[in-house]
Image (cartoon, rainbow, N blue to C red):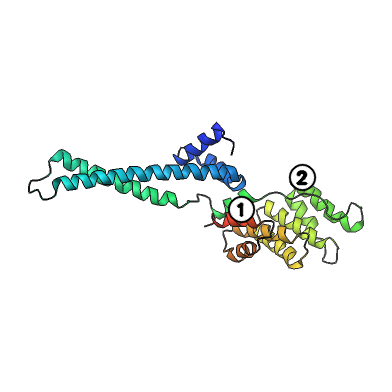
Amino acid sequence: MKKNNNDIESIERYLSDELNSAEKLILDQRLTEDESFAHEFQRRQMAHTTLDYLIAKNLKAQLQELENENKGKVVSINKNRQKRLVILSLAASILLIVTFFFIIPQNSMSNAELASAYYESPDLTVRGSETTNPDQELLKDGITALQNGQHNKAITALESIPESNPYYTLAQYYLGHAFYAAGQYDKAAASFARVRASEDIRYLEDAEWYELLSCLAQEADCNALLNNLKANPNHIYYNKALKISKQIK
């Protein structure tokens, strides 16, 4: 990543817990989308972890030195030294605990928030044909409504397209997005599942990915869907599936 002072400052503030919730959400989303930024974040996170470890190690060494100084002595430790011993012990314990949990990436986002972060609106066009024909009319109405943010209108138009229509699978794909945009994630997942079941290679991989996101948006058990994507290195969403698998709860 080309060093950007604003990026570095944001990362350092994140690691120092100085960002508010909205700023953390923005940074978490960027980590999923920008590999070079994520690499810089991991590098600086490791530097913080190493520093914490060295501080804790130094404190433990001081504790050991105090113990060695008093080993075999009958006299009691004076009050100042005793106070120092307690403070060092507590500080070392806290730093070691913090270091342990910092080494393991902690995801502050819920599965629904992850789904939202990964979700991207589809290309709102009629695929496969530029020719106007009666079979396309309802599809075009649904897409136009979706483009204008009229989700319920889009749902009504796209749901009315029968299985006999040659654009049924595509209509179901856009219907899934209309339901997702409307917050009806269970129905979105069902629509994407129908596209997946059609095994139409033009829409199959997109449908598998968006079915997973619709599942995560419901905070449901999505392991089967996720494992299906992770099992196929040639899948267009394979890398994203690997990333999201490390973040879901």
Residue 135 falls left or right of residue 15: right
Task: Residue 207: tell me if it is visible.
Answer: yes
Numbered tag placed on residue 148 in the rendering: 2
Amino acid type of disc 2? Asn
Q: Is 200 placed above or below 174 here?
A: below
Position in image of residue 155 (x %, y %): 75, 55
Please give the residue where the numbered disc 1 appears in the rendered image.
115
Position in image of residue 22 (x %, y %): 54, 41
Residue 56 falls left or right of residue 25: left
Q: Is 36 placed above or below 191 here?
A: above
Residue plotted at (78% across, 59% down) = 202
Res 25 quadrant in image: top right
Amino acid type of disc 1? Ala
Residue 1 falls left or right of residue 85: right
Q: Earlier in the sequence, mark 1 or mark 2?
A: 1
Real-space Cα distance between discs 1 and 2? 22 Å
Residue plotted at (9% across, 48% down) = 73
